[in-house]
Image (cartoon, rainbow, N blue to C red):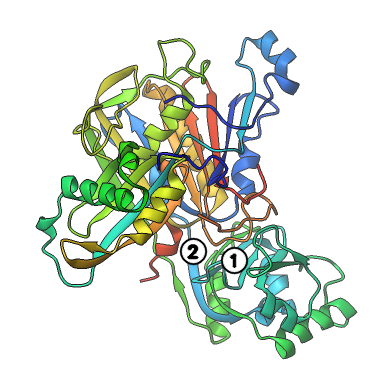
C-alpha cells in the first residue's frame, strides 16, 4: 500500500448544485420527478425536539404493491395499457434481479418499457436494442426501449404483433414487479392495479413501508452557510465535509467516541461545529412515489422557517438494480449501484443538492 | 479533509447571474466531480467457518485484523496507511471502513486474501462499496417483501 494506485477506476461520481427554491429556473422539482424509483427517504432535523406529526403523512399514504411472476406479455395487453398506463402514472420495477448479471425491466410513468438484458436473453428475444454503456465483452448487456404509450402500439399493427410474438413465443420473460400507480382521476383508488393483477390470477400483495426514527441528544453539528459551500471562510464548513458528516449520521456512526488520535478511527465531526440539544432523524423504506417526496420537501421548507432551524436535510436513495437513474439515463451496477440525492434546505430558501451516481452512469 | 476532484467543471452564475444579482439572491453553482473522490467506504463482514463467541472480537481486535490483512499482502510500510473503522457491530462483526480512494483497491485485495485469524478459517465479505458514505445508509438489495 506504500505505492498508491493512482490510475484505479473511480468508484462514483458526485454532482453538487447550489440554488434557490424561488428561482424560476430552479430544477428541484424536475430533479425529484425524474428520479422515478425511490427506495428510501431520510430526513434530518437538527435542533428539533420532536418530529412534526404531519411530515410523515405523505409517505404513509403511498400504496405500493409487489406482484409475483408477471410475464412481460401481460403488461403490453391493450386492457392493461388503457386502464393504467394511459390513465395515470404507473411505476413498475423488477425485483430480486441483479442488473449487473441478470435481466431487469422497468416501466416508466412516461410509458417507456425498458429491458436491460444479458446477451443470451437479448439474442433469444430477437428485438432490436442497443449495447449498454456498462460492461465489457464478457458481461455485455443490451437495452431495449419500447414506447407502450405510442398511438401505433395497438393490436393489429406490425410492431405490436412482433413484440407480442417475441415476448410470448421466443422468450417468456417473467419478473416479480414492484409497482405503484398514481391515477389521473382522484376518484380512482391506486389499489385498482392490485385488483387487476389479482383478477388475472397473479399474487399481488401490498408492499409494507418500513419506518424508523432516531433521536439524538447533545449532538455536535457542523456549522454551514448556504452562501459559502466551499468553506473558504473559517466560520463555516465545506459542503463536501458536511456531506460526509450527513452520511456518518445516516449510517449511525458514533461520533461521540472518536477523536483524531484514536486507534480505530480518526474521523471526527468537521469544524466549526455547534452543539444541539436535540436532533431528530427518520427514515422510510419501501417504494415511494415522486409526488410524496415533493410533499415532504414542501413541508420541510415550511418547518425550517417556522421552527427556525439552521437547515434540514432530505435524502432519497434509488434502487440499485434500476435500469435508469434520472429520466431515461442508463444506470448500472459496477462497484455499486448508487443513485441518490440529498437536499439541504436553508431557511432563506437556498438549497444545496448533492446527486451521487455510480462510476459508469451518465452524469446528471 | 481537503477536497480536490481530479476533473471538475465549474459553472458559476450561468444563466441566472443577472436576475440573481438584481434580487440579491445567491448565485447558481454547479460542481461535477467525475474523478476520484477523497475517500472510499466499504461495508464488510468478517465470517468465521466455525462459531466464534461475538465478544471475542471487539473493535480494537477487528482493526488489528484489518491491518494484519493489509500487512500480510503489501508489507510493513502498508500499515502506515490510515484506515478508519467508522462503525463496528460486534454481534455479527460487520463494519464500515474508510480509506483514501488511492488505496481502496489494495485494501479490498488485502481483505479478499485474508483467510485465517488465530488458526481459525475466516473470510471478509465485502457487502457494499461506495465513494459516498451516505450511500451505505440504504441497500435496496436487502428489501424485504415480508
Report the residue at 64% width, 81% height from top: A173
* Disc 1: which residue: A92
- Front position in the image: B127 or A242: B127
Quarter of the image where the C terminus of chain A is located: top right
Report the residue at 54% width, 53% height from top: A289
Give the answer, above or below, for where A99 lies relative to A297.
below
Circle 2 crowding by C-alpha within 10 Å: few under 14, some 14–19, many from 20: many
Quarter of the image where the N terminus of chain A is located: top left
Question: From where the camera sits, is residue A125 visible?
Answer: yes
Residue A275 falls in image quadrant: top left
Residue A7: x percent and y percent?
57, 43
Secondary element at image label 1:
strand
Question: From where the camera sits, is residue B138 visible?
Answer: no
Residue A74: x percent and y percent?
66, 81
- Front position in the image: A210 or A135: A135
Foreground: disc 1 or disc 2:
1
Q: Which mark is residue A64?
A: 2
Secondary element at image label 2:
strand
Q: Chain letter for mark 2, please.
A: A
Residue A183 falls in image quadrant: bottom right
Query: How many numbered callouts?
Result: 2
Q: Chain letter for mark 1, please.
A: A
Amino acid at each position: 500500500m506504500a505505492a498508491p494506485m493512482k490510475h484505479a477506476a473511480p468508484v462514483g461520481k458526485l454532482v453538487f448544485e447550489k440554488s434557490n427554491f424561488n428561482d424560476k429556473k430552479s430544477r428541484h422539482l424536475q430533479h425529484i420527478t425524474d428520479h422515478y424509483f425511490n427506495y428510501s427517504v431520510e430526513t434530518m432535523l437538527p435542533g428539533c425536539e420532536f418530529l412534526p406529526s404531519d411530515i410523515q403523512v405523505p409517505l404513509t399514504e403511498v400504496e405500493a404493491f409487489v406482484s409475483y411472476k408477471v410475464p412481460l406479455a401481460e403488461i403490453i395487453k391493450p386492457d392493461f395499457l388503457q386502464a393504467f398506463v394511459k390513465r395515470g402514472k404507473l411505476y413498475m420495477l423488477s425485483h430480486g434481479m441483479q442488473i449487473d448479471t441478470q435481466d431487469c425491466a422497468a416501466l416508466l410513468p412516461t410509458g417507456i418499457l425498458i429491458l436491460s438484458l444479458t446477451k443470451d436473453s437479448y439474442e433469444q428475444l430477437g428485438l432490436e436494442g442497443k449495447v449498454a454503456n456498462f460492461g465489457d465483452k464478457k458481461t455485455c448487456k443490451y437495452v431495449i426501449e419500447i414506447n407502450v404509450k405510442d398511438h401505433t402500439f395497438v393490436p393489429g399493427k406490425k410492431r405490436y404483433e412482433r413484440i407480442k410474438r417475441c415476448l410470448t413465443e421466443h422468450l417468456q420473460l417473467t419478473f416479480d414487479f414492484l409497482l405503484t400507480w398514481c391515477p389521473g382521476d382522484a376518484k380512482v383508488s391506486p389499489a385498482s392495479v392490485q385488483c387487476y393483477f389479482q383478477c388475472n390470477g397473479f399474487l399481488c400483495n401490498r408492499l409494507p413501508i418500513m419506518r424508523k426514527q432516531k433521536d439524538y441528544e447533545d449532538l455536535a453539528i457542523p456549522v454551514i452557510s448556504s452562501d459559502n459551500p466551499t468553506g473558504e471562510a473559517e466560520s463555516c464548513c465545506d459542503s463536501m465535509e458536511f456531506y460526509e458528516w450527513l452520511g456518518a449520521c445516516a449510517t449511525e456512526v458514533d461520533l461521540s467516541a472518536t477523536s483524531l488520535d484514536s486507534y480505530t478511527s480518526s474521523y471526527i465531526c468537521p469544524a466549526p461545529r455547534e452543539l444541539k440539544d436535540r436532533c431528530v432523524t427518520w427514515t422510510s423504506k419501501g417504494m415511494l412515489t415522486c409526488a410524496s417526496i415533493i410533499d415532504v420537501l414542501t413541508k420541510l421548507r415550511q418547518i425550517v422557517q417556522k421552527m427556525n432551524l439552521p437547515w434540514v436535510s432530505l435524502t432519497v436513495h434509488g434502487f440499485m438494480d434500476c435500469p435508469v437513474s434520472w429520466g431515461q439515463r442508463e444506470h448500472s451496477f459496477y462497484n455499486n449501484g448508487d443513485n441518490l440525492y440529498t437536499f439541504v434546505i436553508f431557511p432563506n430558501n437556498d438549497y444545496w443538492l448533492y446527486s451521487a451516481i455510480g462510476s459508469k452512469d451518465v452524469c446528471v | 479533509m481537503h477536497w480536490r476532484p481530479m476533473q471538475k467543471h465549474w459553472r458559476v452564475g450561468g444563466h441566472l447571474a443577472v436576475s440573481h444579482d438584481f434580487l440579491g439572491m445567491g448565485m447558481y453553482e454547479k460542481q461535477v466531480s467525475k474523478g476520484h473522490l477523497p475517500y472510499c467506504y466499504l461495508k464488510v463482514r468478517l465470517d468465521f467457518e466455525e462459531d466464534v463467541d461475538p465478544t471475542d472480537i471487539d473493535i480494537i481486535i477487528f482493526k488489528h485484523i484489518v491491518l494484519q490483512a493489509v500487512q500480510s499482502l503489501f508489507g510493513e510500510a502498508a500499515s502506515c496507511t490510515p484506515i478508519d473503522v467508522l462503525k463496528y457491530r460486534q454481534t455479527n462483526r460487520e463494519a464500515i471502513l474508510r480509506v483514501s480512494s488511492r488505496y481502496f483497491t489494495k485494501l479490498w485485495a488485502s481483505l479478499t486474501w485474508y483467510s485465517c485469524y488465530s488458526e481459525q478459517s475466516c473470510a471478509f465479505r465485502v457487502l457494499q462499496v461506495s465513494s459516498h458514505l451516505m450511500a451505505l445508509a440504504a441497500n435496496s438489495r436487502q428489501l424485504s417483501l415480508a
